[in-house]
Amino acid sequence: MVGHRFDRLARQLSGGVSRRIILCLLAAFPAAAGLADLLDEDVEAGRRRQRRRARHRHHPGHRKENRKGKRKRCRRKTKFCANRCGPVKKKGCKKPLNCGPCRVFVTSTTQDGNLGRLGGADAICQALAKDAGLPGTYLAWLSDETQSPATRFTRSSGPYQLVNGATIANDWTDLTDGTLDTAITVAETGATFDDLGFRSWTHTLADGAAGGVLNEHCENWSTGANGANGDEGQVAATTDNWTDFASGTCNNLFHLYCFQQSCVADPAAEGRKRLGSNGHG
């Protein structure tokens, strides 16, 4: 027998006998004691339900659909901030980053045509930049039979500058129009290589596509043999000769052009931070 039936029984009894009295009477009989306990539990359960309803009316956050762990969660999409040196991941960015120029240098070292393919040439640029405290990612201005700067570089909409601050081009379009504002004669160390006799391995046309005088690339930059050839650029030139000048045998020791693919807001500050993390300065 449930609680509401006892309520109806109580109303039917004479003298308006209350539910509490009925419970007391039932408790007086051993056979009805268990039933009285059940009625007490039913009453308490009803009170608990009423309290929960009251809390939910006043505190919507307690509702089942709003409880912690039950809320619907949306996936956070990775956002990209547009900047002048290519896309840089940045969570929650709402406006373009104020990035600095992309740095460019000619390597202070020289190599024969066995560069370890494009990946090996890129590694040379990256290692020299790191040793000089230059931040960012660097790739070699170099092509083989399948790839070229036009296909693998991030095309900057901002300036390309030497490490001494001189601008060689205002953006990618300016860089690949056939002429440079300033020759790429400054190395990552700040040393200058402005002699007309200095060369750089390229196998790359002025527009960034693969090609050259003999259309040679030292077997995809895997050999330094005298019997193979590779296209080269003239380091001191500002015409298209800077990248498409001649072709030489792969045992020659030539430089590389290195271009930064990512930019930072303040290259000088990044350099100081790098020195600080190494315990210097």
Image (cartoon, rainbow, N blue to C red):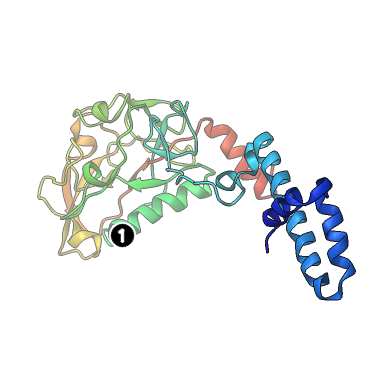
Above/below status of 3 relative to 27: above
Q: Residue at x 24, y 59 (%)?
A: 221
- The residue furthest bottom is 31
Observer-nearest residue: 27 or 162?
A: 27
Q: Is residue 111 visible?
A: no
- The residue furthest front is 14
Above/below status of 163 relative to 256: above
Residue 44 location in percent, x, y? 77, 55
Q: What residue sits right under mark 1 in the picture?
A: 115
Residue 192 shown left or right of residue 135 in the figure? left
Quadrant containing the N terminus in the rendered view? bottom right
Observer-nearest residue: 235 or 178?
A: 178
Above/below status of 73 relative to 119: above
Determine the image quadrant of residue 42.
Answer: bottom right
Q: Residue at x 45, y 34 (%)?
A: 163
Q: How many marks?
A: 1
Q: Secondary structure at mark 1?
A: loop
Residue 281 location in percent, x, y? 69, 41
Neighbourhood count class around disc 1 (C-alpha, 10 Å): few under 14, some 14–19, many 20 upward: many
Q: Residue at x 55, y 50 (%)?
A: 70
Determine the image quadrant of residue 39.
Answer: bottom right
Residue 135 shown left or right of residue 10 in the figure? left
Observer-nearest residue: 67 or 9?
A: 9
Residue 274 location in percent, x, y? 60, 44
Q: Amino acid at mark 1?
A: Leu
Residue 212 location in percent, x, y? 13, 45
Determine the image quadrant of residue 158.
Answer: top left
Observer-nearest residue: 235 or 36?
A: 36
Q: Is residue 30 visible?
A: yes
